[in-house]
Image (cartoon, rainbow, N blue to C red):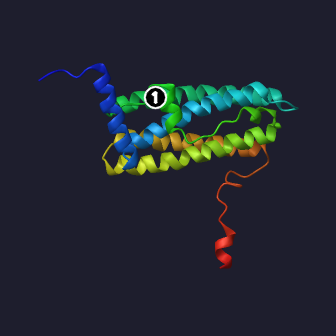
Amino acid sequence: MSELTIEDQYAAELKQSDIDHHVPTAGAMTNHILSNLMVEYVKLNQVKWYVKGANYFGLQAEYDRLLQENTAHFAELGDLLLDEAQKPSSTTAELTKYSMLEENGAFKYNDADTLVAATIKDFDTENLFVDRAIKLAEKEERPALAAWLVGYRGSNNRNIRQLQAFVGNEARTGLDEEDDDDDED
C-alpha cells in the first residue's frame, strides 16, 4: 500500500472537516471556537489600539488582560483538540473561514462604550458555539473537552458581566431579549 502524499493528507483532512461541519461533531464545533478566538484576538487589539476618552487607561489594562486570556485559551484549545485526536485549523484562511465573528476596519472610530458593547456581543456569540460544543462533547463521551469548554463558558460569562458593568448594565442586559413581534400574532 502506498503512502499518501502531503497534499493527499491535507485534501483528506479538508474533506473530513467539510463533512464534520455539515453534521457537527464536537471537534468541528470546537474548531469554530478556535476560529472565533483568533478573530477575537484581532478585534480585542483593535479596541485596545483605538479606544479614546476618559476611560482610556482602565480599558488599556482590561484589554491587556483579555488579550492574555484569549492567547492562553487559543493555545490550550489547540492542544486539547490534538489530545482528542482532532485537527485544529492551522492556517489563517481556515480560521477565518470557520469564525462567526465579524470584523470592520471602520469600527475603530466608535466611542468606548460602543467598542466595549461589541466585545460583549462577541463573547455572547462565542457562547452559542461553546454551548453546542459542550453538548456534542458530552454526547461523544469526551469528558476532558467538555470540562474545558464548561470552564471557558464560565470565563466568557465573567468577561461579559465585567464589561457590562463598565457600560452600566447588568450581566445579561441586551443579550437575552425575546422577539416581541411573535407575541402579537
Give percent across and percent down for residue 121: 66, 46
Which residue is rendered at x = 46% and y = 28% of the image?
Answer: 76
- Label 1: element kind: helix
Asked whether 18 or 78 is in front, the reply is 18
Tell me the amino acid under the disc marked 1.
Glu
In the picture, the quarter occupied by the C terminus is bottom right
Name the foreground residue: 98 vs 125: 98
Q: Residues within 10 Å of mark 1 (few under 14, many from 20)?
A: some
Residue drawn at the location 35% of the way across and 29% of the way down: 82
Q: Please, is residue 156 above or below residue 5 in the view?
A: below
The answer to whether residue 108 is above or below residue 22 is above
Q: Residue furthest bottom?
A: 185
Horizontal side, residue 111 vs residue 18: left or right: right
According to the image, label 1 marks what residue? 76
Q: Position of residue 95 (x, y in %)?
A: 50, 32
In x, y percent, where is residue 100?
Answer: 56, 42
Q: Is residue 106 left or right of residue 150?
A: right
Q: Residue at x 68, y 25 (%)?
A: 64
> Which residue of the protein is positioned furthest toward the right in this rendering?
54
